[in-house]
Amino acid sequence: MKILILGAGAVGAYFGGRLLEKGEDVTFLVREKRQEQLKKNGLLIKSKHGDVHVQPKTILADAEDEPYDVVILATKAYHLDNALKSIEPFVREYTSIIPLLNGIEHMEELRAFFSPEQVLGGMCFVESTLDSDGAVIQTSDMHEAVFGEWNRAETERVLAIEEVFSGTKTTFRRSDNIQQEMWHKYLFITTVSGITSLMRSPIGPIRDTMEGRTYIQQLFEEIRLTMEAHRAPIAEGIIEKQMVTIEKQAPSMKSSMLRDIEKGAPIEGDHLQGYLLLLAERYGVETPLLRLVYQHLKVYEKNLVE
């Protein structure tokens, strides 16, 4: 099975590197600077689950038209428009597209750009970053990519993908209810990224103060009410379960959004918090804390470009 991964950043390089380590046929679609870096240094993963150093195959967007069986999108949401155009020449009728983006809004765009049948649901849980030499530094226990048919079917193609993805030194898991799992992750990541970015702090100091914990729960609740108004398939008692997950996080855990802010990098505020605010306005849900978080992020973005 030929696999194309769009992006060799902290996410794409980690999961793609694990597939390469196993011996799968993986190619990275990258920009010229990243291609040069990978040719010079190879793809190095430094992880608590085991290091690996491989020499990956890479192509640029103007490469010769070549079909792939699976395309994994491992890019930021603000690069999605360019990403769709970049992968289009490599997609055929039989190609399965698996997005590992945060949020949910991108699914509408993907299913409109390609056929809905080509697009699987997907997401990942991994705390990783690139160092100055382009090596992947992966530090947390969690390193899981999840995928599944959008309509919950158990198809031959998804079983074949599951087989190819198995046996790696990370977790690729097939989900029988990927829509619900994606909405649950959306609830969690939007709350955690929002509260840590607003407070400019890792989760520990926020969680371990009385008012901080109250704000976490309030943001969870505002987002839950918005999702329920939208009839998203979220489970009963999900906030309680996600608060347990918050408790288990290392005090030093930072959201990727906070890490991007600390680096002065672009963020996914419109794709995460912004999309939920649009839904809240559509259904008349009051979300004062979510609105404050979003305004905080927009001020950051304004200062970034000035």
Image (tube, rainbow, N blue to C red):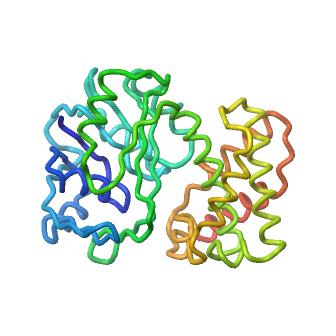
* Quadrant in which the C terminus is drawn: bottom right
306 relative to 165 in the view: left or right: right
In-front residue for pair 183/168:
168
| Whether residue 63 can be seen here | yes
| Whether residue 30 can be seen here | no
The residue positioned 30% from the left and 38% from the top of the image is 71
- Residue 280 in the image: state x and y as whole percent: 78, 41
Seen in the picture, residue 38 relative to 236 is either above or below; the reply is below
* Quadrant in which the N terminus is drawn: top left
Q: In the rendered image, which quarter is residue 94 located in?
A: top left
255 relative to 72 in the view: left or right: right
The residue positioned 56% from the left and 66% from the top of the image is 255
Seen in the picture, residue 87 relative to 242 is either above or below; the reply is above
The residue positioned 45% from the left and 60% from the top of the image is 142
Q: For the image shown, how many numbered marks are present on the structure?
A: 0
- Residue 283 in the image: state x and y as whole percent: 81, 33
In-front residue for pair 212/129:
212
- Residue 253 in the image: state x and y as whole percent: 56, 72
197 relative to 148 in the view: left or right: right
Seen in the picture, residue 19 relative to 209 is either above or below; the reply is above
The residue positioned 67% from the left and 49% from the top of the image is 274
Q: In the rendered image, which quarter is residue 113 located in?
A: top left
Q: In the rendered image, which quarter is residue 49 located in?
A: bottom left
- Residue 245 in the image: state x and y as whole percent: 62, 59
